Amino acid sequence: MQFKRRTLAQIADMICGNFPEEESFFVYRSSSRLTEFFADVETDYAHDGSTRQWWVVDVLGQILAEPQSSPHTPSNTFARVIERLMEREDATNEADDRPGALAQLNAALAREEYEAFYAEDRRCYLRHVPTNTVAAPGPNPHRPFSPAELKRREQLVSFLDSASEDQMIEQILLPLFRQLGFERITAAGHRDKALEFGKDVWMKYTLPTTHVLYFGIQAKKGKLDSAGMSRGSNANVAEIHNQALMMLGHTIFDPEIGKHVLVDHAIIVAGGEITKAARSWIGYKLDASKRSQILFMDRDDILNLFVVTNLPVPSIPSSLSDQAPF
């Protein structure tokens, strides 16, 4: 995606705060504060000492060139730039709903058929006016990673190579799903297998329509393949098949509503690779209705989601005895 250079120059002027102080609706940002601004939106751009406005124009052009989540929305990074620029705490010479700043920003965005607006969560979003598509600055696991993010990804690989299955669940999966908006995350733990019924974790997710979906997770530390039997850290897909059937066939008790409910979807998570043969084998064994209830997450999915949600990489404890009980 590309914006006209005139539009980028106007937005860059707002980011820099190049206005008379008594008339400005935007915070003035020096060289170091520009670097901080772009660090806040999870990038590694650092001001090089050149003219601030034109440096920001070039950076915004690079950000707009990043992959888009849809044809009518700019990159997630650009959405975060607009959200950061319009934070209510930065209101200057006006109320915190920032009518003057919003009008100035929208005068520039209108040229590209976009509009900025504040939602009920008090955050600023971008809307593509012709299609009414909203760009949300959420995590995108498929975007290019910065050098700092690649380093964190390598650290997470080392953790997964050394951690036990319980450590992977408690220190990786539980924080990750909490960050992604899942609720009531409950880990059965391997210490009480009688209560698992094929689930290592169960949780629920509330849709924007207020409907609730329930999920069960079956996690394996190593590779998931279709070999005849489990070997070492590799898990046999037939074991997972039986556990998935148990997961979908048993109810769980939700104390918030005081009822037993069925699991809507089973997520099979592997700390290693889930081979194509393993995915196909499970798909072949399950009937059409249950097949649509199975989701897969392998090591790459875990790594990418963990990095883009900006969660801290855990340190490896000396033994499972260091773990807090579930």
Image (spheres, rainbow, N blue to C red):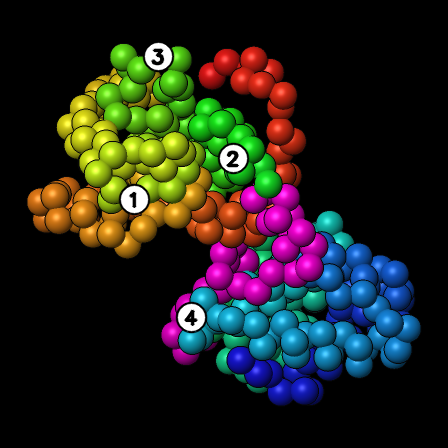
Residue 34 bears which disc, if any?
none
Residue type at tag 2:
Ile
* Marks 3, 1: nearer the viewer: 1
Q: Secondary structure at mark 4?
A: loop
Sequence-earlier tag: 1 or 2:
2
Q: Residue at x 86, y 72 (%)?
A: 48
Residue 225 bears which disc, if any?
1
**Range covered by the magenta-colored residues:** 129-157
* Marks 1, 2: nearer the viewer: 1
Q: Secondary structure at mark 1?
A: strand
Provide the residue designation for mark 2: 172
- Distance in Å between CA atoms under marks 3 and 2: 20 Å
Q: Is residue 41 left or right of residue 45?
A: left
Q: Quadrant of residue 22?
A: bottom right
Sequence-earlier tag: 4 or 3:
4
Estimate the x, y position of residue 314 in percent, counting from the top left.
62, 33
Query: Does the magenta portion include 135?
Result: yes
- Distance in Å between CA atoms under marks 4 and 2: 29 Å
Estimate the x, y position of residue 40 in percent, counting from the top left.
71, 54
